[in-house]
Amino acid sequence: MNWGYKILIVYLVFVAGIIVLVFKSSNEKIDLVTPDYYAKELKHQEKIDAVKRTNALASKVKFEIVNNSLIITLPAEFNEKEVSGEVLLYCPSDGNKDIKKNFTTTNSATTVALSPGIKGAYDLQLNWNTGSRTYYFEEKLFL
């Protein structure tokens, strides 16, 4: 076999490799963290202010998992106050596993039902408000 055929074989193997890589990369699923990330980024300062207000509270948010339920207790400052908000269990690896629940409470506690087979790393994102003041809490959670 002369050197012309060897160059042709190397070239064909290279082209075949590129075609395989293009095919594999075009079939790869790419998930954004959130589809409206730009709008959320514009509201980031509001989130920073809410975190500062939460950190300034005398007591902290408490949470525990009991019998496939996540029980969240807000700080004592919110007892006997009308509180409404949202709980998001965000799964970074799969958006289909996210759990979102809106709540309203006056006893500073709320419960989120968890599926029996739910496992993995989650981010607990809790935002709530009383009147015009908003608060935000975030914590890593392993179920």
Image (cartoon, grey):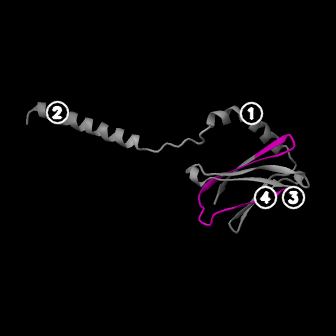
Q: Nearer the viewer, mark 3 or mark 1?
A: 3
Q: Which amino acid type corresponds to the residue marked 4 in the rendered image?
A: Thr
Please tell me which of labels 4 and 1 falls first in the chain: 1
Q: Which mark is residue 107?
A: 3
Which residue in the structure is indicated by mark 1? 45
Q: CA distance from mark 3 to mark 1?
A: 29 Å
Question: Which residue is depicted at the point 67% across and 36% down?
Answer: 40
Q: Which mark is residue 110?
A: 4
Q: Which amino acid type corresponds to the residue marked 2 in the rendered image?
A: Leu
Left-right relation of 12 to 109? left
Q: Is residue 96 magenta?
A: no
The extreme right residue here reads 80
Q: Which amino acid type corresponds to the residue marked 3 in the rendered image?
A: Asn
Crowd tier of the residue under label 3, counting other residues whose Cα lies within 10 Å: few below 14, some 14–19, many 20 or above: some
Please tell me which of labels 3 and 2 falls first in the chain: 2
The range drawn in magenta is 108-136
Q: Position of residue 77 (x, y in %)?
A: 89, 51
